[in-house]
Image (cartoon, rainbow, N blue to C red):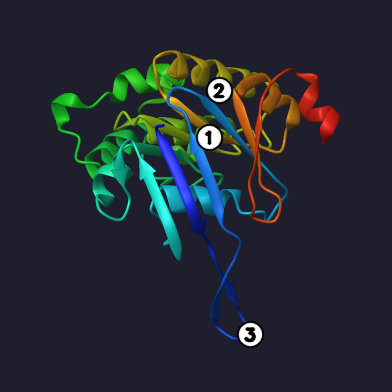
Amino acid sequence: MQLSCAGCKKPTLQPKKLKLKLRSKVNISIPKGSIYGLLGPNGAGKSTLINILAGLVNKSSGSVNIWGFDQDENPRQSRAAIGVMPQELNLDPFFTPGASLDMQAGLYGVPKNQRKTDEILRLIGLEDKANSYARSLSGGMRRRLLLGKALVHSPQILVLDEPTAGVDIGLRQMLWDNVRQLNADGMTVILTTHYLEEAQEMCDQIAIIPRGITAGLRYDRKPSIQARY
């Protein structure tokens, strides 16, 4: 098992009382080399769970194991094993795609002679925009650059948090072609999405997260997800 999250609870802020209240436990195990889908309504906790896995949010209880590393005992190794493509466009408008990828690799401690900036730019289709400022890129190009930033340290696990929300058909197809290639090369992929047809097409297994509680559903045939939900 490549990634597991056992008994994790996420804290939620109560603004009036300025306290943290615990929500329902989440238990999830993701096989190595799979494309695993996380589905659920807005506010169910998909992004929060991803942020816990990435070490961006502190869990209040439970354990997380990523690529054999316990998140509490080996935080640096567990975080280095995972790359996250977030929902939000968090790019510096005055950096070029090439500079953004190079800086991100440096933040992960990747030596200069081991960085794959040009290779990643070719993968995400931004080789001809390598020296253009990020502010001049289209929305779709910026989203592709987010994917590239998640790949700079060659993670074993790639997390895509609603990567195709609001993008056109061409970009969506290019993104999924890239994801399929990365998965075929051995990378484990975790996908959150609101598009059931997308989950059916891409995922090997799916977990539904209603109100913070996972109900693991094994993906079988294409009509099953939409027929049930």
Tag 2 and tag 1, C-beta contact below 8 Å: yes
Q: Position of residue 198 (x, y in %)?
A: 69, 26
State yes or no: discs 1 and 3 in contact (Cβ < 8 Å). no
Q: Is residue 148 above or below residue 222?
A: below
Q: Residues within 10 Å of mark 3 (few under 14, many from 20)?
A: few
Q: Nearer the viewer, residue 101 or 219?
A: 219
Question: In the shown orientation, is residue 14 left or right of residue 52?
Answer: right
The residue shown at (54%, 54%) is 48
Kind of residue at disc 3: Lys
- The residue wearing badge 1 is 143
Ranked by sequence position, the earlier of labels 1 and 3 is 3
User: Three-letter amino acid code at disc 1?
Assistant: Arg
Which residue occupies 37% across, 38% down?
A: 82
Callout in the foreground (2, 1): 2
Q: Looking at numbered disc 2 in the image, what kind of residue is underneath it? A: Leu
Helix, strand or loop at mark 3: loop
